[in-house]
């Protein structure tokens, strides 16, 4: 199979590039008279529509780690990995109903601002610096590296650095226009990635049907997948026994059955969607009802994501196991690229455009958040306190450029070793150490008026320390067995606790510590947010969206339990 792109593929991609660029420039030109307004640049002037908010959330979320990493997990685990996406829809409902009203009522622009308003300046500064490092050296680098590697493989394997620079420049072109350009170009990006992703899944299923003699029929191809790989269509990974194979143990360590639903997966989703700069920036681009509708729209789009980013991985597994896919470059992470090779000329270009859309939209969203945090929470407060509107916008643009330059430099020769561990694992590893503490700090800060600033600082530090201990020193802490689970050999003579369980344990003990420390303070912290029941009431149309989303999720779990 020739992986090189044909002229028609390049033509499709160029058309996509021109459309996005022209549309972005048109939006920027319309708002040019306000370009020196910091609020307009960072927050889109508070007038984003619900569909722009929802599309922008998905565009920033779905990137190379989903297309490449989650497809790879589909190859390895099967449909169980869809829990990340389907439960994200539930998390978005929780965020829309309970989290967003707190942010909007207290006029929160950034996550560090939340921490300063609710706790103290020290907590805000610590987390602002941390988020900058995390966004630059974990998020930007992994997305840029994975994206460049995937597109380079399809383009012939000789243009890695050219593609890397091209992706960075494309993202810069969009992000330098500010939040409004990012959000509205994301609408096109989402349309392209969904259409391109669905086309890829359709071709993958028809290819399976063709090879297994049931015709070029997507539904028939899906039935072949269920017949040939029934273990890949179970939402719950069974707990290993003493006679389990290493492969079964590895699967459980990646997604530990029902314990995933008790522990880590909720912390991952609620922390990502509820305590994340990307969310607040878009939600503050509207009033409460519009923000809620946009977030719920994003939740409904999340239900489609497994079909786009996971199903090709299962198709690749069945084709590979039956000798129809002899090469899988890069192990399981090569599953998506391998499936793309089956696409006909032109459609391959559309799929590359979809992958590029996901990468560029995510890069643009993240550098815009980096710019906002640095400018509003560090530079304006500690370096140039008298900076005016025009200076803040210019500083923000410099921060965008600097962040992208650092990402390119650190991915140029894969200095951080992303390729060695895989992009999905790389992101989970380094964000997972801090997520339990951060989520505990935000959750208690929003909904328990007694939580103190001291408890918040202790929570962040303790959450990180406990995560490291549970991940790296499990036998020392627990021995080889506990009341909750058994730690199984990982093939190297050591013992390992599943990652989700580590997060759950860390979150539990961090919450206990924060609650205990807060009891030593006043019954009501003077900085506590005012919360009333009116904030959380939802309109009938909102209730309808929530019910529809939940019914679809229940139906999916009943089907694949």
Image: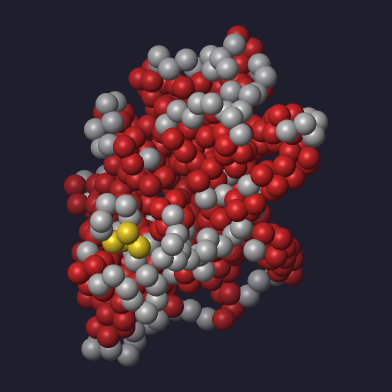
Percent x, y for residue 531?
A: 48, 79
Residue at (31%, 37%) from the top-left corner? 420
- Residue at the top extreme of this rendering: 7
Residue at (25%, 56%) from the top-left corner? 493
Residue at (28%, 61%) from the top-left corner? 495
Q: Is residue 41 visible?
A: no
**Image quarter hosting the N terminus:** top right
Report which quarter residue 321 is drawn in: top right
**Image quarter hosting the C terminus:** bottom right
Identify the colour scheme used. Answer: secondary structure
- Number of numbered callouts drawn: 0
457 or 138: nearer the viewer:
138
Residue at (57%, 34%) from the top-left corner? 320
Percent x, y for residue 335?
A: 52, 34
Report which quarter residue 291 is drawn in: bottom right
231 or 530: nearer the viewer:
231
- Give the answer, above or below, for where 2 lies relative to 544: above
Percent x, y for residue 15?
A: 62, 18
Left/right placement of residue 241 relative to residue 493 reads right
91 or 234: nearer the viewer:
234
Left/right placement of residue 242 relative to residue 412 reads right
Left/right placement of residue 482 relative to residue 179 reads left
- Give the answer, above or below, for where 333 lies relative to 503: above
Percent x, y for residue 27?
A: 57, 32
- Give the answer, above or below, for where 330 lies relative to 469: above
Q: Is residue 72 visible?
A: yes
């Amino acid at each position: 199979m020739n992986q090189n792109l044909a002229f028609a593929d390049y033509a499709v991609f160029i058309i996509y590039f021109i459309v996005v660029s022209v549309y972005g420039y048109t939006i920027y030109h319309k708002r040019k008279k306000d370009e020196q307004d910091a609020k307009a640049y960072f927050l889109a002037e508070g007038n984003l529509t619900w569909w722009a908010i929802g599309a922008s959330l998905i565009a920033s979320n779905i990137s190379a780690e989903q297309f490449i990493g989650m497809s790879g997990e589909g190859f390895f685990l099967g449909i169980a990995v869809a829990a990340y996406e389907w439960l994200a829809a539930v998390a978005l409902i929780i965020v829309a109903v309970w989290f967003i009203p707190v942010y909007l009522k207290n006029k929160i622009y950034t996550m560090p601002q939340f921490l300063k308003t609710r706790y103290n300046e020290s907590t805000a500064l610590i987390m602002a610096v941390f988020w900058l490092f995390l966004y630059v050296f974990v998020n930007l680098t992994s997305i840029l590296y994975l994206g460049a590697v995937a597109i380079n493989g399809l383009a012939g394997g000789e243009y890695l650095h050219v593609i890397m620079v091209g992706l960075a420049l494309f993202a810069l072109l969009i992000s330098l226009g500010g939040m409004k350009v990012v959000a509205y170009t994301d609408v096109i990006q989402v349309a392209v990635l969904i259409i391109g992703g669905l086309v890829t899944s359709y071709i993958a299923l028809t290819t399976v049907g063709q090879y297994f003699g049931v015709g070029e029929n997507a539904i028939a191809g899906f039935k072949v997948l269920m017949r040939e790989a029934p273990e890949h269509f179970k939402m719950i990974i069974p707990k290993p026994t003493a006679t389990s194979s290493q492969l079964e143990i590895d699967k459980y360590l990646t997604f530990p059955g029902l314990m995933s639903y008790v522990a880590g997966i909720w912390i991952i989703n609620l922390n990502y969607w509820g305590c994340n700069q990307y969310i607040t920036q878009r939600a503050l681009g509207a009033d409460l009802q519009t923000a809620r509708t946009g977030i719920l729209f994003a939740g409904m789009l999340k239900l489609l994501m497994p079909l786009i980013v996971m199903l090709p991985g299962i198709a690749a597994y069945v084709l590979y196991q039956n000798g129809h896919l002899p090469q899988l470059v890069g192990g399981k992470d090569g599953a998506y690229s391998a499936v793309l090779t089956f696409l006909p000329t032109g459609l391959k270009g559309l799929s590359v455009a979809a992958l590029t859309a996901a990468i560029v939209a995510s890069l643009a969203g993240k550098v815009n958040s980096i710019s906002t945090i640095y400018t509003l929470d560090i530079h304006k407060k500690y370096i140039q306190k008298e900076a005016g509107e025009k200076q803040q916008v210019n500083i923000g643009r410099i921060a965008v450029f600097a962040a992208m330059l650092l990402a390119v430099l650190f991915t140029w020769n894969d200095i951080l070793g992303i390729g060695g561990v895989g992009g999905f694992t790389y992101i989970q590893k380094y964000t997972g150490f801090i997520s339990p503490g951060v989520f505990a700090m935000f959750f208690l800060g929003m909904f328990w008026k007694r939580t103190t600033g001291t408890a918040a600082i202790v929570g962040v530090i303790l959450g990180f320390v406990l995560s490291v201990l549970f991940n790296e020193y499990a036998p020392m802490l627990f021995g080889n067995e506990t009341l909750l689970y058994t730690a199984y050999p990982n093939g190297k003579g050591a013992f390992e606790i599943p990652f989700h369980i580590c997060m759950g344990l860390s979150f539990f003990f961090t919450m206990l510590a924060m609650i205990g420390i807060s009891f030593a303070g006043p019954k009501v912290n003077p900085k506590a947010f005012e919360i009333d029941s009116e904030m959380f009431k939802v309109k009938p149309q909102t209730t309808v969206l929530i019910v529809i989303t939940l019914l679809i999720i229940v139906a999916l779990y009943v089907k694949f339990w």
